Image (cartoon, rainbow, N blue to C red):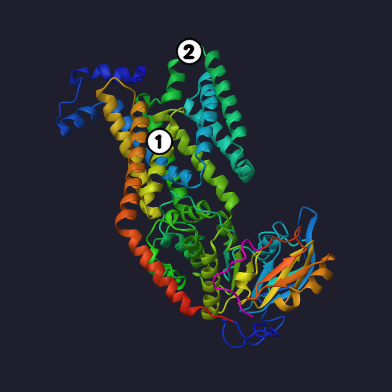
């Protein structure tokens, strides 16, 4: 699906990827999927697939049910209807094929644990008991060093995590999620509470890592502009409905107006950044109109 | 506080008793440990300090220090009830604090930020404990001992129970060490990785209740914070590696206990006064040290290097940026 983007040259993931084989190669398959808690449905009727190596951006306002989708894929929340399969299996907790970075909250500034140890939890933090074997300790150290280098965090590997900046902490959580080489990376608002420069750096990093390691990405955000150039497809969640397609298909005045039965207008500025007007009740808009690296069409 | 049994021991060996230190360390320690009540105090104090230090590190990491404080106060009602019934007060503490911690563990997340509820239950328990104490017509010294510690009155049997409890708590802590650390630092990711964070939370609260029951003997329910939370809080600020932090926390708790016992032996002041004072002084010193280290680091080394690297990173990213 990486190549199926009319009007857009290939993204930083490189040359066209063969489209995911539906049914067998798909990382996530959903048919008539509904999400909700305790009998209340948040959204329903979602039909989509995420192919191997695909980048899906999930857009929607706070409370639209974006994180709920991630929690269902992780097996932490039952589906409220329809079918959901992850790697061809029903979702289950502790799936080693999934890396997950939850919505960020600042770490305790007094926390003096080193960056290495935070990332190391991703390797064996779920195992019972204490680490005894020296060989395991060496393997763990190598895996952690590799993940830290991959996200460009090697230089603060031994620093206390509480004293690192938001962008630096976000890189560590990314390294922790990737240390087991997952085939699917779930990111929940990874750009929230980062400054614009860090937003661009983290988006770029995710794109580069995906190109190297070829995992699929589900990227939850309320502003598509920082990831517009690397997104294969967009999922737009608002008003209990879900629509999936390429950015050109989904984020258009006609489509959003039809979907939400409101007068919605999609504006595009000279750099190709998109602004949705008319879904104010449904959608949070980009915080700032300035984006240093820009996204050119 | 020296209870009657300890007084008996003391008077029976009165010939060896010296009023103050002779400033010969070996002789002083030999002198101190020639008394059975001091040997008992050191044995039970060490066992409960190790547990308090190690459990306390996780208490600090998980942000449950108020829960630990509340559990000890709820335990006071149990202790007073046990005294009224003629039972061992420490067993009363253990019974009621285990029950309370299980309840808090089950409520779990819903209790987070509910300081008012926890505080009210804590106050009600203290009141109930006071009622039991006033109904008890025997020695009021017992109540005093529960509130402020009673380590010099500890019997051989209680020493053995304390050591046994410590061994059990430490074994269980070792068994859940990695998932507990993961869940304490990042509950959401830990849950997604398949760690049963709910069950682990309840299990940890039970371990905390046992640690509280042990530490109550040294510092009493009112002063439990010192032994259970201060070493962990100091270690959290200073140590980079979790294993080192645990070791530091355990060692600090033991050191505080030993020094307090020795000081209390040579002075007329109670053990728990020294425990709380040393713990507080240690915490202040740790804060001062980390502040100084942070300041020195910023002004001397880190800032310029960090700035250079950030500039280099910006340049590197600039060339790698893919523009469409």
* Chain to which the residue tagged by mark 2 belongs: B
Quarter of the image where the C terminus of chain B is located: bottom right
User: Of label 1 and label 2, which has the lower sequence position?
Assistant: 2
Query: Where A109 falls versus A178 (above or below)?
Result: above
Quadrant position of residue A32 = bottom right
Q: Nearer the viewer, residue B205 or A194?
A: A194
Question: x, y (%) of residue A147?
Answer: 45, 70
Tell me the residue at 79%/61% (across/down).
A239
Quadrant position of residue A269 = bottom right
Inspect this view and state whether residue A246 appears.
Answer: no
Question: x, y (%) of residue A130?
Answer: 43, 57
Most common secondary structure along the magenta stretch: loop
Pair 1/2: label in front: 1
* Chain to which the residue tagged by mark 1 belongs: B
Query: Is residue B137 shown left or right of residue A41?
Result: left
Query: Where A67 falls versus B12 (above or below)?
Result: below
Quarter of the image where the N terminus of chain B is located: top left
Query: Where A261 falls versus B93 (above or below)?
Result: below
Q: Residues within 10 Å of mark 2 (few under 14, many from 20)?
A: few
Are labels 1 and 2 on one chain? Answer: yes
Q: Nearer the viewer, residue B163 or B221?
A: B221
Inspect this view and state whether residue B9 appears.
Answer: yes
Q: Which residues are magenta?
A: A286-297
Question: x, y (%) of residue B175?
Answer: 47, 53
- SS label for mark 2: loop
Residue A294 inside the magenta-drawn segment: yes
Q: Residues within 10 Å of mark 1 (few under 14, many from 20)?
A: many
Q: Tell me how many marks there are.
A: 2
Looking at the rendered structure, which numbered label has been put on residue B227?
1
Residue picked out by circle 2: B138
Residue B180 inside the magenta-drawn segment: no
- SS label for mark 1: helix
């Amino acid at each position: 699906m990486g190549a199926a983007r009319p009007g857009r040259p290939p993204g930083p993931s490189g040359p066209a990827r063969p489209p995911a084989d539906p049914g067998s190669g798909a990382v996530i398959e959903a048919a008539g999927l509904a999400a909700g808690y305790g009998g209340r449905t948040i959204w329903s009727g979602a039909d989509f697939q995420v192919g191997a190596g695909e980048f899906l951006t999930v857009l929607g306002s706070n409370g639209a049910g974006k994180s709920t989708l991630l929690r269902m894929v992780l097996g932490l929340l039952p589906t409220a209807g329809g079918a959901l399969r992850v790697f061809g299996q029903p979702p289950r907790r502790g799936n080693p094929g999934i890396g997950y970075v939850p919505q960020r909250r600042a770490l305790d500034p007094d926390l003096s644990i080193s960056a290495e140890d935070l990332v190391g939890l991703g390797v064996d933090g779920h195992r019972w008991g204490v680490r005894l074997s020296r060989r395991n300790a060496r393997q763990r150290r190598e895996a952690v060093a590799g993940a830290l280098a991959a996200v460009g965090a090697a230089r603060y590997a031994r620093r206390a995590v509480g004293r690192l900046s938001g962008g630096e902490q976000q890189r560590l959580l990314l390294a922790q999620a990737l240390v087991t080489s997952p085939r699917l990376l779930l990111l929940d608002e990874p750009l929230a509470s980062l400054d614009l420069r860090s937003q661009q750096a983290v988006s770029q990093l995710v794109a580069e890592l995906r190109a190297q390691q070829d995992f699929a990405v589900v990227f939850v955000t309320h502003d598509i502009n920082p990831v517009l150039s690397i997104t294969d497809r967009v999922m737009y969640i608002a008003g209990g409905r879900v629509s999936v397609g390429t950015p050109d298909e989904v984020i258009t005045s006609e489509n959003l107006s039809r979907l939400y039965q409101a007068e919605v207008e999609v504006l595009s500025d000279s750099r190709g950044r998109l602004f949705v007007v008319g879904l104010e009740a449904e959608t949070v808009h980009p915080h700032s109109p300035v984006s240093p690296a820009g996204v050119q069409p | 506080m020296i209870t009657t049994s300890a007084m008996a021991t003391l008077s029976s060996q009165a010939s060896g008793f010296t009023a103050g230190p002779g400033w010969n360390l070996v002789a002083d320690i030999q002198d101190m440990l020639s008394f059975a009540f001091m040997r008992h105090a050191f044995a039970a104090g060490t066992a409960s300090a190790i547990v308090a230090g190690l459990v306390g590190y996780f208490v600090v990491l998980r942000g449950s220090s108020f829960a630990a404080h509340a559990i000890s106060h709820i335990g006071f009602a149990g202790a007073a009830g046990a005294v009224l019934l003629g039972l061992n007060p420490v067993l009363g503490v253990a019974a009621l604090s285990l029950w309370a911690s299980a309840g808090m563990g089950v409520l779990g997340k819903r209790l987070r930020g509910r300081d008012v509820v926890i505080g009210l239950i804590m106050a009600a328990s203290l009141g109930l404990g006071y009622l039991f104490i006033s109904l008890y017509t025997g020695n009021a010294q017992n109540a005093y001992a529960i509130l402020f510690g009673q380590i010099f009155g500890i019997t051989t049997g209680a020493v053995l129970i304390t050591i046994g409890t410590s061994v059990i708590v430490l074994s269980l802590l070792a068994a859940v060490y990695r998932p507990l650390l993961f869940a304490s630092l990042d509950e959401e990711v830990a849950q997604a990785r398949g760690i049963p964070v709910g069950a682990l939370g309840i299990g940890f609260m039970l371990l905390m209740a046992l640690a509280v029951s042990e530490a109550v003997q040294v510092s009493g329910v009112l002063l439990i914070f010192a032994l259970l939370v201060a070493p962990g809080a100091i270690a959290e600020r200073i140590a980079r590696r979790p294993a080192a932090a645990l070791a530091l926390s355990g060692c600090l708790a033991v050191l505080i206990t030993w020094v307090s016992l020795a000081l209390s032996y040579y002075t007329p002041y109670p053990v728990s006064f020294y425990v709380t004072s040393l713990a507080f002084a240690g915490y202040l010193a740790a804060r001062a040290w980390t502040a100084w280290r942070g300041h020195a680091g910023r002004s001397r080394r880190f800032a310029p290097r960090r700035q250079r690297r950030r500039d280099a990173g910006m340049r590197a990213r600039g060339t790698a940026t893919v523009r469409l």
